[in-house]
């Protein structure tokens, strides 16, 4: 620390270049980010990471090495260099992720790859890259780092059992693939559309535009229904009561015609009307019909 405080500016031109270049680069990145946001380009997220993390660390590294003149073996220089390289690796992987998976075509295979899988892959690659950076910058053997990492993982695992349980459950859901983004599900008493699957939970948008967060461990342990599989066709059963004075064949004929002529009711499978029960004051009939997808069910039932 005393060595750092005792340093003087050893090179005037690097200081001038840093003072002018750093704000200029930030200004250019701000313009690029605004452009990407207007065009809805996915690479804007990575540019924001570069602006907030990579460029400030690079400026700090240049300041320490070429303005203060600190040696490459200096502890402060090594710390800043390590942070810079890790952030740079993270940003580069972000660029790859944006170019490969940043498509707006929801029908492509890239759009269907779960976000959790992409995040885990990027985190794994960053961890591997960080170990090699650690070895290169600090000159230590990777075996020692792996040993320390193993001991630390045990301690962290005991302290973070519940969050790690959600991550592991998310991985199991990822491999089993019982649901995807865009599927309609009934989970934890909530019916809605899956809009995100992340490290900790599944985000479900309800028909009333509410966002319900269901932990991964709940989906993995408890039963839930996927209304989009094995087919998107949904079947509804409505019950109606008619007088004992109404002939059953006439009731079935009229109700069958009603179902066949209601917009949204599928012709295949064909709608049917069945006698259900005989309570005291009416005969109960079941109207069975199908719609193309879950989101049409409420509107078509209302029409019926």
Image (cartoon, rainbow, N blue to C red):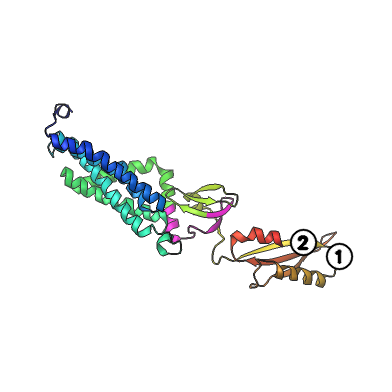
Q: Is residue 173 magenta?
A: yes
> Which residue is drawn at the image coordinates 53% and 51% (left, top)?
204
> Which residue is drawn at the image coordinates 69% and 63% (left, top)?
237
The quadrant of the image that shows the N terminus is: top left
* Magenta stretch, residue numbers: 170-193
> Which residue is drawn at the image coordinates 38% and 42% (left, top)?
158
Residue 4 horizontal/vertical position (percent): 16, 29
Q: CA distance from mark 1 to mark 2?
A: 13 Å
Q: Are marks 1 and 2 in contact (CB under 8 Å)?
A: no
The quadrant of the image that shows the C terminus is: bottom right
Left or right of 86 in this view: 161: right
Left or right of 74 in this view: 54: right
Left or right of 175 in this view: 276: right
Q: Nearer the viewer, residue 12 or 104?
A: 12
Say which quarter of the image contains residue 241. bottom right
Residue, disc 1: 244
Residue 198 horizontal/vertical position (percent): 43, 51
Q: Nearer the viewer, residue 99 or 228?
A: 99
Q: Which mark is residue 240?
A: 2
Element type where label 2 sits in the image: strand
Q: Callout 1 environment at 10 Å: few (<14), some (14 to 19), or many (20+)?
A: few
Residue 63 horizontal/vertical position (percent): 19, 36
Residue 273 seen: yes
Give above or below for 218 relative to 56: below
Q: Which mark is residue 224?
A: none
């Amino acid at each position: 620390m005393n060595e750092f405080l005792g340093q003087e500016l050893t090179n005037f031109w690097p200081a001038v270049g840093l003072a002018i270049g750093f704000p200029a680069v930030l200004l250019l990145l701000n313009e690029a980010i605004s452009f990407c946001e207007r065009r809805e380009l996915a690479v804007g997220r990575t540019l924001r990471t570069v602006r907030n993390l990579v460029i400030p660390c690079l400026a700090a590294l240049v300041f320490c090495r070429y303005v203060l003149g600190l040696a490459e073996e200096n502890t402060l220089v090594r710390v800043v260099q390590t942070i810079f390289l890790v952030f740079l690796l993270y940003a580069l992987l972000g660029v790859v992720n944006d170019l490969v998976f940043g498509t707006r075509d929801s029908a492509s295979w890239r759009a269907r790859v779960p976000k959790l899988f992409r995040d885990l892959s990027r985190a794994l690659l960053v961890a591997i890259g960080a170990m090699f950076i650690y070895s290169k910058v600090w000159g230590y053997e990777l075996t020692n780092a792996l040993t320390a990492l193993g001991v630390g993982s045990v301690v962290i695992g005991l302290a973070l059992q519940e969050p790690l349980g959600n991550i592991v459950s998310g991985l199991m859901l990822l491999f089993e693939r019982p649901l995807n983004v865009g599927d309609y599900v009934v989970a934890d008493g909530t019916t809605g559309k899956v809009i995100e699957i992340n490290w900790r939970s599944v985000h479900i948008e309800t028909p009333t535009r509410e966002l319900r967060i269901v932990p991964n461990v709940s989906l993995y342990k408890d039963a839930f229904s996927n209304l989009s599989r094995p087919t998107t066709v949904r079947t509804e059963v409505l019950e109606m009561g008619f007088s004992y004075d109404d002939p059953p064949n006439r009731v079935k004929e009229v109700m069958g015609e009603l179902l066949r002529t209601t917009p949204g009711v599928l012709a295949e499978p064909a709608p049917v009307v069945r006698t259900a029960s005989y309570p005291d004051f009416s005969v109960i009939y079941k109207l069975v019909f199908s719609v193309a997808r879950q989101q049409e069910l409420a509107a078509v039932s209302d029409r019926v």
